[in-house]
Image (cartoon, grey):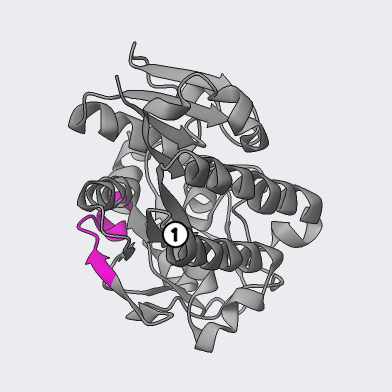
């Protein structure tokens, strides 16, 4: 029996991917998660899924018995917030450098394909955006390391660029919530939506189901490619807030934030295959408001 490993499998995107993989494949799935942001509430109850509570730095020990039976590793277990990476530098480096290097080496040693969740935060502005924050820096370096290991040693990979993913099981509170989750939580509690100044900065948003679908398709194609998945429309944060029809309050600017989300056509001479998401943020917010009103 072949296995698929999902690091961060108890998190928002990881749990959605496991749910999708159970439908699309017959393989057993192993989740590795240290539950720093993941939750047992996100567990998908199925006999084909095994959950391991451990750090990615322990991947060799955790998967010793299964190492020769693993088909692919979807690596989602990284520190994933821009502003917070300045205040939690050790956690960011522990996860995104030490943990990820162990995962990459594990894949290389066992000839396993890695599907890596890159970020739009490290794209654009002639590659200068990757230096805006510790988070963007680590993600860009991991992406470059994977590409180099492919050229040097034949490491198989697929790299997916995420654009502000939202949807079922997203984090709604705490410092690790993203903007759509924060706005949704405020709407449910009838609190003003916090819009980071100046409010005219723009972002692209992608529903989690579109995201995991592209992750699965990339895994199946096995082409050593780069994919971005996002809406074909970008939104100013103030305009996103207005979709919720709730009070708004402005909060101070945050370190490391970009003014605009960029979609690039290539990176290091390699084409980026841009996939347009089908679900719209407008429809999501409209449905959410109806649910809350009920």
Residue for badge 1:
164
Which of 167 and 133 lies nearest the eye of the viewer? 133
Where disc 1 sits, the SS reads loop
Q: Establish if 23 lies above or below 231.
A: above
* Occupied quadrant, residue 84: bottom right
Residue pushed farthest top?
Answer: 47
Quadrant in the picture for the C terminus: top left
Q: Residue at x 64, y 68 (%)?
A: 137
Can residue 34 be seen in this snapshot? no
Residue occupying image coordinates x 22% and y 46%: 220
* Residue drawn at the location 29% of the way across and 19% of the way down: 1
Within 10 angstroms of label 1, few (less than 14), some, or many (20 or more) residues? many
Judge whether residue 145 can be spotted in this image: yes
* Above/below status of 274 relative to 292: below
Residue 145 in percent (x, y) is at 55, 63
Which residue is at 29% across, 42% downward?
290
Camera-nearest residue between 182 and 290: 182
33 vs 117, left or right, is right
Q: How many marks?
A: 1
Residue 109, horizontal then vertical, whole percent: 51, 42
- Tell me where residue 50 appears, x and y as whole percent: 44, 17
Check residue 25 for magenta coloring. no
Residue 19 sits in which quadrant?
A: top left
Q: Does 86 appear above or below 43?
A: below
Residue 278 horizontal/vertical position (percent): 19, 57
Q: Is residue 278 magenta?
A: yes
Q: Nearer the viewer, residue 251 or 61?
A: 61
Image: magenta residue range: 273-284
């Amino acid at each position: 029996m072949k296995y698929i490993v999902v690091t961060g499998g108890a998190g928002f995107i990881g749990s959605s991917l496991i749910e999708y993989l159970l439908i699309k494949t017959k393989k057993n799935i192993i989740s590795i998660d240290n539950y720093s942001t993941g939750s047992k509430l996100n567990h998908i109850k199925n006999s084909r899924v095994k959950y391991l509570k451990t750090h990615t730095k322990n991947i060799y020990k955790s998967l010793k018995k299964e190492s020769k039976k693993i088909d692919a590793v979807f690596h989602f277990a990284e520190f994933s917030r821009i502003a917070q990476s300045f205040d939690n530098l050790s956690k960011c480096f522990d996860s995104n450098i030490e943990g990820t290097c162990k995962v990459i080496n594990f894949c290389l040693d066992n000839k396993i394909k890695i599907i890596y969740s890159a970020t739009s935060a490290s794209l654009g502005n002639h590659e200068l955006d990757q230096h805006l924050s510790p988070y963007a820096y680590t993600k860009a370096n991991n992406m470059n390391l994977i590409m180099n290991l492919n050229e040097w040693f034949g490491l198989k990979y697929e790299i997916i660029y995420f654009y502000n993913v939202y949807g079922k099981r997203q984090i709604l509170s705490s410092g690790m919530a993203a903007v759509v989750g924060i706005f949704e939580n405020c709407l449910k509690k009838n609190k003003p939506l916090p819009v980071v100044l100046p409010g005219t900065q723009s972002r692209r948003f992608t529903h989690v189901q579109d995201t995991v679908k592209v992750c699965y398709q990339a895994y199946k194609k096995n082409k050593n490619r780069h994919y971005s998945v996002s809406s074909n429309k970008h939104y100013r944060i103030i305009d996103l807030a207005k979709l919720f029809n709730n009070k708004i309050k402005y909060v101070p600017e945050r370190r490391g934030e970009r003014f605009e989300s960029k979609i690039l056509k290539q990176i290091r001479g390699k084409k980026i295959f841009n996939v347009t998401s089908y679900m719209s943020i407008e429809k999501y917010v409209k449905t959410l408001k109806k649910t809350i009103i009920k």
